[in-house]
Image: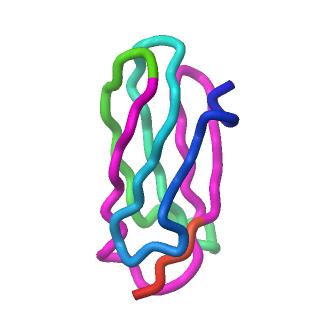
Amino acid sequence: MFEQGLNMFPNPTTGALTVNFDLSNAATVNFTVMNLLGETVLSTSKGFGAGAQQNVLDLSSLSNGSYMVNILADGMVATRKVTVNR
């Protein structure tokens, strides 16, 4: 369910990446951005209530290239590829 309701845009992004998702329960959501070598380049967490949610990740400090965004919420994990292109 979490995977289906997940949407990230714009992709490619110049820095601000909007993440929309739905939660069945209130949860702390962990956002981890990794480069293609598997190294964590950005990590943050935030508490959200149940229902439709939106969060903006600031990727402006990252170099141009492709990254994997992992989102862990309430025991569920989703991964999306995103490109930074300024």
Give me the residue at 64% from left, 41% from top.
78
Q: Position of residue 86 (x, y in %)?
A: 39, 88
Instruction: Classify residue 83 by image quadrant.
Output: bottom right
Residue 65 vs residue 57: left or right?
right
**Residue in the foreground of this view, choosing between 41 and 60:** 60
Give me the residue at 63% from left, 73% from top.
36
**Residue in the foreground of this view, choosing between 59 and 17:** 17
Indicate how the structure is coloured in the image: rainbow
Q: Position of residue 67 (x, y in %)?
A: 56, 69
Residue 71 vs residue 79: left or right?
left
Give me the residue at 40% from left, 31% from top.
53
**Residue in the foreground of this view, choosing between 10 and 72:** 10
From the image, give the main secondary structure of the stretch colored magenta. strand
Q: Position of residue 77 (x, y in %)?
A: 63, 36
Up-down relation of residue 48 to residue 8 (above or below): above
Up-down relation of residue 50 to residue 31 (above or below): above
Residue 1 vs residue 58: left or right?
right
Magenta highlight on residue 13: no
Up-down relation of residue 61 to residue 40 (above or below): below
Residue 76 vs residue 61: left or right?
right
Image quarter in which the N terminus is found: top right
Instruction: Classify residue 49 by image quadrant.
Output: top left
**Looking at the image, how many numbered discs can be counted on the residues?**
0
Q: Which residues are magenta?
A: 52-81
Magenta highlight on residue 57: yes
Query: Can you name the residue that lies furthest to the top here?
Result: 25
Give me the residue at 45% from left, 26% from top.
52
